[in-house]
Amino acid sequence: MDTPQDFRLDHGLLRRRLRQVAARNIEGDSDFLVREIARRMDERLDLIRVTPRRILDLGCGAGFDLVRLGERYPDATRIGLDLIEPLRARAQLAPAQSPLRRLFGKSASPVILAAADAARLPLADDSVSLVWANLMLPFIDDPLPVFREMCRVIETGGLVMFSSLGPDTLRELRETLPSHAGERVHRFIDMHDLGDALITAGLEDPVMDMEMITLTYDNLDELFVDLRANAANNAALTRPRGLCGRTAWEQSRARYEQRRREGCLPVTVEVIQGHAWKSAGAGKQAHPDGRSVVRFHPRSRENP
């Protein structure tokens, strides 16, 4: 896709924020959304018949998903790649190994960890069976090069599974903050654009799901703490560089307070999940007239 200016990210700023997150290494539940979406992605694997030999966790962060994938596929070699190397530390401390495997003295499958750019993967062609990318896509400004790399490194018959966030994410914050100086809230790529990019990259039979989740916070400051803890605050090149001013800030808080329900402030999260395959005819059109089909299954769920 041709990346609109609003989606272009300040990659230097993003790297600095991710390094800060890694350096703090704070124990807590600020990554609860990442873990919940990982759980939902894992549930989808119950319905998909795949036995991967090598698994790539792209954007592995602290490595919790590597542990989960090791529990599901204990014989698979796991590869964890992330933009910032220090974020890998926790994965090294918690290798997945079941009690039964320990009882019989069988070592857990190996975990290979490295820092890498998702658009330039340091892996050979056709070298992995499953690519897993949980909430990595919001940290890139163009999904097409990343999907092309996924298609390159995955073997024929391999599966790509990912999650992302859609444009309605943080819509309450977007609607209440002043916009006269520019967009102050991170923008997210639409599900249909992701589906088109999958097809263009050469992946086939994509299936996309969307569901709306409503998180609740006692106050707005708690939301900002969680965003900063996950390096998820706005990193767009077009973001305003200055503060909005005390008066505008107080007005924004007051507008958000008007949305309070049952004592809590709502925060909308549009969760996108998708998967696609690499077949022997990857990249070929699905219809004689050149059309490709992406199956979309929207859902709606609110978690107060």
Image (tube, rainbow, N blue to C red):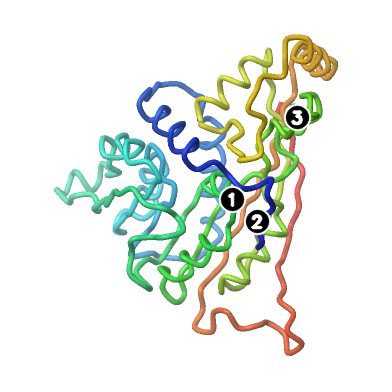
Residue 170 lies, in percent from the top left, at 71, 32
Label 1 sits on a secondary structure element that is: loop
> Residue placed at 39% from the left, 57% from the top?
56
Amino acid bearing label 2: Thr
Label 3 sits on a secondary structure element that is: loop
Q: Residues within 10 Å of mark 1 (few under 14, many from 20)?
A: many
> Residue placed at 33% from the left, 69% from the top?
124
Earlier-in-chain disc, 3 versus 2 = 2
> Residue placed at 26% from the left, 35% from the top?
93
Q: Is residue 279 left or right of residue 198?
A: left
| Mark pair 1, 2: CA separation | 7 Å
Between residue 165 and residue 263, name the one nearer to us: 165
> Residue placed at 70% from the left, 54% from the top?
191
194 vs 138: above or below: below
The outermost residue toward the left is: 105
Determine which residue is flagged by label 2: 3
Q: Residues within 10 Å of mark 2 (few under 14, many from 20)?
A: few
| Mark pair 3, 2: CA separation | 21 Å
Amino acid bearing label 1: Asp
| Mark pair 3, 1: CA separation | 21 Å
Determine which residue is flagged by label 1: 141
Determine which residue is flagged by label 3: 181
